Amino acid sequence: LQWLRNPGPQHEKRTLFGDMVCFLFITPLATISGWLCLRGAVDHLHFSSRLEAVGLIALTVALFTIYLFWTLVSFRYHCRLYNEWRRTNQRVILLIPKSASVPSNQQSLLVLQSLKRNSKETIV
């Protein structure tokens, strides 16, 4: 979520949003189209020519191959963008002891232990 709130390049966020919308529309359409093609292939095998059935099966295989290829390429692209963003936008917190009554070693260790449980930030 921090990546989405980051005021970085907007085209990356638009691309992610566009790909999500396409995925939500294309997934049901590909599923229904594949099911209809296979259903038609079964009907053609029983009632008419085998050549049309083979054509419908080939169409189904091509449809799902293209769908899976697009999904994998899109997912890989967005994962690469996210990993690049994580590498270049690390959050660092500098801890400074507040009180003189507790030795700074013990205080910083206590703070480090509590922060390690709550976040994945780099402590300096």
Image: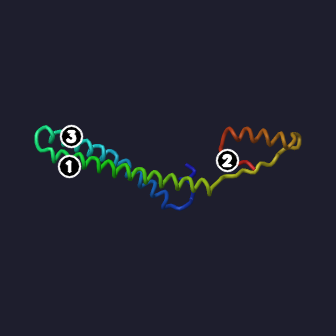
Q: CA distance from mark 3 to mark 2?
A: 53 Å
In the drawing, does residue 22 fall left or right of residue 81? left
Of marks 1 and 3, the one in the foreground: 1
Label disc, if present, on residue 27 of the rendered structure: none
Give coordinates of residue 112: x percent, y percent.
75, 41
In front of the other: label 2 or label 1?
1
Q: Residue at label 3?
A: 39
Q: Is residue 104 left or right of residue 91?
A: right
| Callout 2: SS | loop
Q: Residues within 10 Å of mark 3 (few under 14, many from 20)?
A: some
User: SS for tag 3?
Assistant: helix
Instruction: Report the residue marked by disc 2.
Output: 121
**What is the secondary structure assignment of the residue under circle 1?**
helix
The residue at the point 82 percent across, 41 percent down is 107
Which sits earlier in the primary sequence, circle 2 or circle 1? 1
Q: Position of residue 8 (x, y in %)?
A: 56, 60
Report, in whole angstroms, how far the alpha carbon at label 1 lies from the one at label 3. 13 Å
What residue type is disc 2 on?
Glu
Snapshot quadrant of residue 111: top right
Residue sitting at x 19%, y 42%? 41
State yes or no: discs 2 and 1 in contact (Cβ < 8 Å): no
| Sequence-wise first label, 3 or 2 | 3
Contact flag, marks 1 and 3 (Cβ < 8 Å): no
The amino acid pointed to by label 1 is Gly
Residue at x 23% of width, y 45% of height: 57
Label ID, residue 55: 1
Q: Earlier in the sequence, mark 1 or mark 3?
A: 3
Q: Residues within 10 Å of mark 1 (few under 14, many from 20)?
A: few
Q: Kindly identify the amino acid type of the residue bearing the numbered disc 3.
A: Arg
Front residue of 114 and 83: 83
User: Marks 2 and 1, how far apart in space?
Assistant: 55 Å
Residue 107's place in the image compared with 81, above or below, is above
